[in-house]
Amino acid sequence: MPAEKNVQLWRPLLLSAAVTLALLSLIALSDRTPAPANAQTLQAAGPLKWYRGNLHTHSLWSDGDDYLESIALWYREHNYDFLGFTDHNILADKERWIDVEKSKGKQKAFDKLKQKFPDGWVEERKTEDKLETRLKTFREVADRFNEPGKFLLIQGEEISDAFQKFPVHMNANNVKELVVPRHGGSVAETIQNNTDALIAQRERTGQPMMIHLNHPNFGYGVTAEDLMRIRGENFFEVYNGHPGVNNSGNKEHASTERIWDIINSFRLSELKMPPLFGLSTDDGHAYHNIPSRASEPGRGWVMVLSESLTPESLIAAMEAGRFYSSSGATLDRVTSSAEGLDVSVKVDPDVKYTIEFLGTRRGFDSKSEPVLDKDGKEVRATRRYSDDIGKVLARAEGTTASYRFTGDELYVRARITSSRRHPNPSESGEFERAWTQPTIGPASK
Ligand SMILES: [Zn+2]
Ligand SMILES: [Zn+2]
C-alpha cells in the first residue's frame, strides 16, 4: 500500500502533530524494503578489529604429530590471533605421559620442543629404556601463551562420531567439559544429538560455546539434506585444509560450496531457518614438513570482526555473521544491507581479484533427483538440484564490487578468487580465496 493512502486513513483521527509525525515515519519505514536480519558493515573501526583464527587443530593429544605449545608457537609466529585446539574425543585436561619414540612426532618433535622451550618447561623421565615426556595440559599452555588482545588459545574438541561407515565429525569450541559422541539412528540424528549435547552444556554452564559441522565430504559422510534441517547448528566447513576431505566433491558428490547453497536455499525458503555460515579451517595434523601434501597448518582461517579477543566476544561475533572465511584473500569491508552486498578486497598490487555474487531467487526450482551409480543404484550423496540454486548472479574484476538486490533474492553471498595460486593448497590448482557469509535477501522475509 502506498504511503499517501496510509496518511489519508489516519487524518480523520485528528492526532496531534507530534504523533502524526511519528506515525508518518513509521509508515515510511514499513513501506521501504525491510533491512535484512544481518544488515551490517564489517570494517575495522573503533573497538572493532579483525581477528584471524583457526578453529580446527590436532596435537599429540590425539592424532596430530606435535605438542600443543609447539603448535601454539607456530600459529603465533604466523600472524594468527586465536587458535582452537580440537583433538578427537579428548580434552587436554589430565596428566598424561607419552613414550617419545612411539609418539607420532617421534624424537624429532621432542627435540624441537626442547629447543623452542629451553627454560626447564619440558618434563621428561626414563622408565626402563623408554624416554617419556608429560604432555602439557590446555590450561598450562593457555596460561603461557594467552595475552589479552594479542593471542588467545581456545579449548575445544572434535566430537568424532559416525553413523554406520559415515563419519560425522563436529567441532565444539570453548567447551568446559568433554562431549562424548552421542550417536544416532541416522547421519542427521547423529548431528542433531551431538548439537543438542553441546547446547545443553552451554545452557547448564552459562559459558558461550559453538559447534560446527566439519568437512561434510570426508568419507562423503554428510549430505546437504542431512544438514539443512539440524536445529541449533549454524556453521559448517566450506573449506577444510586437510587434503583428504574432498572440498570440491567428485562426479557423484556435490562440492562443499554447492552443499552450502542448497542448504541456504531451503533454509531461507520453505524451512524458515537461519542461514548456515561457512567456515574455513586447517584441520592440521602434520607440523614438521611444510609445505608438503599432508594436513598442515596455514591453509584456511576465519577473520572475525570482534570487540575483543575473548571466546565470548568472538563467538558472539560469529553467531551474528560478523566474519568471513579465507584461504588467502583478505577483505577490508563487507556491507550487507537492504540494498545488497558490497565487498572491498584489501589491495595487493601483485594480484588481480574476481568477485562473484552467488545466490538463489524466490520460486527457484526445488525439485531434486537422487544420484545413481553406473548400475543405476542410488548413491548416498547430496541429491541433484537445478542450476537455479547458487547461481552466479554477477561477476566483477577488481578490488571492489557491489550487488544490488532486484527483489526476489533469498540470499546473496560473495566469493573472492585471487589470481595467485594457494602456496600450499589442499587440492592441486587451488587459488587463494575468500567467502563472505550470505546476506539475507528481500525474498526471505
Ligand atoms: Zn574430522
Ligand atoms: Zn580434525
Image: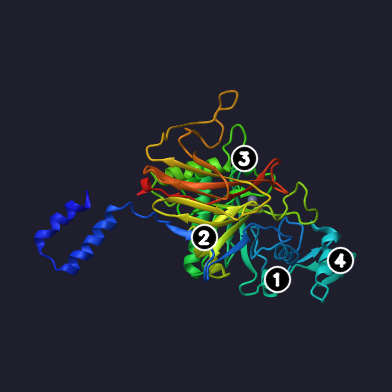
Type of amino acid at the residue the image marks with label 4: Leu
Q: Tell me if mark 1 has few (under 14), some (14-19) or many (20+) residues whose alpha carbon lies within 10 angstroms of its own.
A: some
Mark 4 and mark 1: span between their CA atoms?
Answer: 22 Å
Q: Disc 4, disc 1: CB below 8 Å?
A: no
Q: Mark 2 points at which residue?
A: 318
Q: Tell me if mark 3 has few (under 14), some (14-19) or many (20+) residues whose alpha carbon lies within 10 angstroms of its own.
A: some
Question: Which mark identifies residue 165?
Answer: none
Q: Does the residue labelled 2 lie within 8 Å of ligand 2?
A: no
Pick the front one: 228 or 146 = 146
Type of amino acid at the residue the image marks with label 2: Met
Q: What element does badge 1 sit on?
A: helix
Q: Is residue 83 above or below residue 293?
A: below
Question: Which mark identifies residue 131?
Answer: 4
Mark 4 and mark 3: span between their CA atoms?
Answer: 43 Å
Q: What element does badge 3 sit on?
A: loop
**In the rendered structure, which disc, 2 or 1, sits on the residue that comes first in sequence?**
1
Q: What element does badge 2 sit on?
A: helix
Mark closer to the observer (4, 1): 1
Q: What element does badge 4 sit on?
A: strand
Q: Name the residue under label 3.
A: 248
The residue sitting at 59% across, 57% down in the picture is: 302
Q: Tell me if mark 2 has few (under 14), some (14-19) or many (20+) residues whose alpha carbon lies within 10 angstroms of its own.
A: many
